[in-house]
């Protein structure tokens, strides 16, 4: 993993155009790097994991797209991260969205296709700090009044308000049976999730009190109407947007996705078959095909000048 220091702490990320030997991102011209130096700059995709997931949740999608795009996956401090944030950091959904915007700024990423799954963080940049976004893709994520989403989201929010309860709830993920229940992580995917992946994703939360502190701060500080308020700003987004939903999603109902697409002036709605919330895990090929069609239908210039 690469790492970059931001105002609230250091976050890790992956970047297909740069290796991970140094642990820090080199100074570079956007769009350059291995595979891009002898030709025109490639378009940049930023894939954002959801609550409790690290970059590996996107790995099948990254593997498919890396030949044609520069693909970055930042691990925001919402439970899947391994490096705790600074004490007192603003870890509300809006605060974390600010860190995502800062990440784009610090790496000088331009004309980005920003893709969010599960959490709703990416949509909070719209109308606030969206100058680097050329296209927006919201894939089976929190939106409108579906927050906290489903039984899983409501259980996390309730547990975060009872001392010790969040850790107790998360400890259930140590059990393959409990983690695989439809009312737990298993309900987010159509296919059974290998337990080694569950332990990888939730390992930091299970072993590091500071990571649990960060997640608790996020759950405490994020208001229930966060995405209802954000919806009004979506009406002013003047660039292409795709709302991509798991056709069999139970935690994020497809009707929420259709309502979300109607708010975006240049939005389209599409369902990915054989998928629930974790589309990158359930049907990465279907997700990649939809992304390629969307990008091809909405060409965006790769700009090397300042933003």
Image (tube, rainbow, N blue to C red):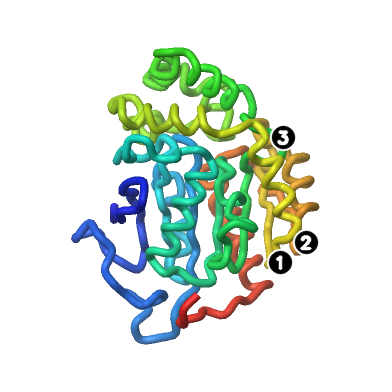
Q: For the residues labelled 3 and 2, say whether their Cβ atoms are less than 8 Å apart.
A: no
- Residue sitting at 64 percent across and 27 percent down? 150
Around disc 3, counting alpha carbons within 10 Å, would you say few (fewer than 14), some (14 to 19), or many (20 or more)? some
- Residue sitting at 29 percent across and 28 percent down? 208
Tag on residue 238? 1
Q: For the residues labelled 1 and 3, say whether their Cβ atoms are less than 8 Å apart.
A: no
- Residue sitting at 70 percent across and 61 percent down? 237
Q: Please count the marks in the image.
A: 3
Q: Secondary structure at mark 1?
A: loop
Relative image position of residue 224 (x, y in whole percent): 64, 31
**Separation of residues labelled 3 and 2 (CA atoms):** 20 Å
Q: Secondary structure at mark 3?
A: loop
**Separation of residues labelled 1 and 3 (CA atoms):** 23 Å
Relative image position of residue 54 (x, y in whole percent): 40, 43
Res 127 → quadrant: bottom right
138 shown above or below 28: above
110 shown above or below 304: above
Q: Is residue 44 left or right of residue 213?
A: right
299 shown above or below 123: below
The residue at which mark 2 appears reads as: 265
Res 194 → quadrant: top left
- Residue sitting at 63 percent across and 76 percent down? 299
Q: Can the viewer see residue 153?
A: yes
The residue at which mark 3 appears reads as: 145
- Nearer to me, 263 or 140: 263
| Mark 3 or 2, nearer chain start | 3
Q: For the residues labelled 2 and 1, say whether their Cβ atoms are less than 8 Å apart.
A: yes
| Mark 2 or 1, nearer chain start | 1
Q: Can the viewer see residue 282?
A: no
């Amino acid at each position: 993993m690469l790492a970059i220091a931001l105002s609230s702490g250091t976050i890790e990320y992956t970047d297909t155009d740069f290796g991970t030997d140094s642990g820090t991102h080199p100074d570079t011209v956007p769009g350059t790097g291995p595979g891009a130096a002898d030709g025109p700059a490639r378009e940049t995709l930023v894939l954002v994991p959801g609550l409790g997931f690290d970059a590996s949740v996107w790995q099948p999608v990254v593997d498919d797209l890396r030949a044609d795009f520069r693909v970055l996956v930042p691990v925001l401090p919402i439970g899947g991260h391994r490096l705790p944030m600074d004490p007192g950091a603003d870890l509300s959904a809006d605060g974390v969205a600010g860190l995502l915007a800062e990440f784009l700024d610090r790496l000088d990423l331009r004309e980005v296709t920003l893709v969010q799954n599960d959490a709703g963080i990416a949509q909070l940049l719209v109308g606030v700090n969206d100058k680097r976004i050329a296209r927006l893709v919201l894939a089976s994520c929190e939106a409108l009044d579906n927050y906290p989403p489903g039984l899983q989201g409501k259980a996390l929010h309730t547990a975060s308000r009872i001392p010790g309860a969040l850790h107790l709830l998360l400890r259930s993920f140590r059990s393959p049976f409990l983690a695989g229940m439809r009312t737990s992580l298993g309900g987010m995917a159509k296919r059974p999730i290998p337990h080694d992946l569950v332990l990888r994703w939730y390992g930091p939360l299970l072993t590091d009190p500071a990571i649990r502190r960060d997640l608790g701060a996020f759950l405490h500080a994020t208001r229930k109407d966060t995405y209802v308020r954000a919806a009004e700003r979506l009406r002013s987004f003047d660039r292409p947007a795709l709302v991509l939903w798991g056709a069999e999603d139970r935690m994020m109902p497809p009707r929420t996705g259709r309502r979300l697409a109607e708010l975006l002036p240049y939005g389209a709605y599409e369902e990915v078959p054989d998928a629930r919330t974790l589309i990158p895990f359930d049907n990465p090929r279907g997700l990649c095909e939809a992304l390629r069609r969307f990008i091809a239908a909405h060409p965006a210039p790769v700009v090397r000048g300042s933003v």
